[in-house]
Image (cartoon, rainbow, N blue to C red):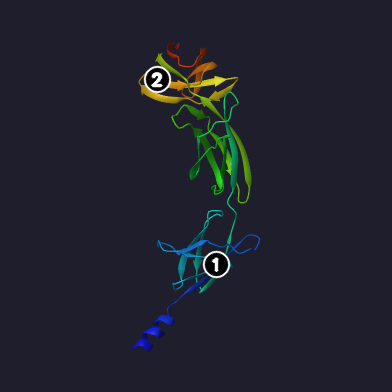
């Protein structure tokens, strides 16, 4: 009876997977699992993992420093090549040029927090086009969203400006069906944080200093108005569009 059980265990089907990077070097500690299973087997220092499975089967291979791979296997052995995940290195400064620490930088697939020198590093960025933005812990800092194109193995460098939203502006708009509001400085659009929005009334936290209030309708600027806001300002502005 013991002999029969041993023979059955020895005959259990397995698949051997060898994982390497695009340069042909073994990838250790990659997680290899059958699609749909939570359990995984980690690759050895030689990049080898043996799975209890029978082909045909779909396997998933993942590692924090590499792009994930999905493979459809028809045999009991497979060689998988993983491309290096893009790396994003950056720094966040406030609009006075000082390093902004404790700021959350959000990007496609996750987020990172800046250190005391405003620096952040992401080693598992997703491939492709994606948006990057940032926000302070109390929403007192906000970056204008930027887009980047991440390719396998690339190291991207990014410098973000986080504007301090130290003023509050309530804008009442009349004679407009579908108004939108934006803010510019030196021709560049600035971020703002909407606190409350009702028909014809918008309350936002906005950057301080000299800026331009822009009211748009159907995506087109209808009116611009220069403003100068100081820290702690709580101002109301009434805008009437001409027909």
* Residue 148 position in % (x across, y down): 58, 40
Q: How many marks?
A: 2
Q: Is residue 77 above or below residue 197?
A: below
Residue 145 disc label: none
Left or right: 199 as drawn, with respect to 18: left
Q: Quadrant of the C terminus?
A: top left
Frontmost residue, 240 versus 11: 11
Q: Is residue 119 above or below residue 63?
A: above
Frontmost residue, 112 versus 189: 112
* Residue 219 position in % (x across, y down): 49, 24
Under tag 1, what secondary structure? Answer: loop
Residue 37 appears in which quarter of the rendering?
A: bottom left
- What residue is rendered at 49% in x and 66% in y? 72
Residue 44 disc label: 1
Regarding residue 96, the answer to whether it shows in the image is: yes
Q: Dot 1, crowdedness within 10 Å: few (<14), some or many (≥20)?
A: some
Depth check, mark 1 against mark 2: the one in front is: 1
Left or right: 77 as drawn, with respect to 137: right
The residue furthest right is 23
Residue 235 appears in which quarter of the rendering?
A: top left
Under tag 2, what secondary structure? Answer: strand
Q: Dot 2, crowdedness within 10 Å: few (<14), some or many (≥20)?
A: many
Of labels 1 and 2, earlier in sequence is: 1
* Residue 172 position in % (x across, y down): 40, 14
Q: What's the CA distance linking mark 1 and mark 2?
A: 58 Å
Q: Would you name the residue on which mark 2 appears?
A: 202
């Amino acid at each position: 009876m013991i002999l029969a059980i041993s023979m059955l265990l020895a005959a259990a089907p397995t698949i051997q997977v060898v994982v390497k990077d695009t340069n042909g070097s073994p990838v250790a500690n990659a997680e290899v699992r059958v699609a749909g299973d939570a359990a995984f087997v980690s690759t050895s220092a030689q990049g080898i993992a043996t799975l209890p499975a029978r082909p045909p089967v779909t396997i998933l291979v993942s590692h924090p420093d590499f792009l994930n791979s999905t493979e459809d296997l028809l045999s009991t052995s497979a060689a998988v090549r993983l491309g290096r995940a893009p790396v994003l290195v950056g720094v966040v400064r406030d609009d006075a040029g000082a390093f902004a620490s404790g700021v959350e930088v959000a990007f496609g697939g996750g987020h990172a927090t800046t250190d005391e020198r405003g620096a952040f590093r992401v080693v598992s960025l997703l491939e492709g086009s994606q948006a990057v933005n940032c926000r302070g812990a109390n929403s007192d800092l906000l970056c204008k969203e930027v887009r980047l194109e991440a390719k396998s193995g690339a190291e991207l460098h990014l410098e973000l400006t986080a504007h301090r939203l130290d003023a509050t502006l309530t804008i009442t708009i009349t004679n407009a069906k579908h108004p939108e509001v934006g803010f510019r400085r030196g021709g560049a659009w600035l971020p703002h944080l909407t606190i409350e929005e009702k028909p014809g009334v918008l309350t936002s936290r906005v950057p301080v200093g000299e800026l331009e209030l822009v009211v748009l309708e159907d995506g087109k600027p209808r009116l611009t108005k220069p403003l100068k806001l100081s820290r702690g300002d709580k101002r109301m502005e009434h805008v009437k569009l001409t027909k």
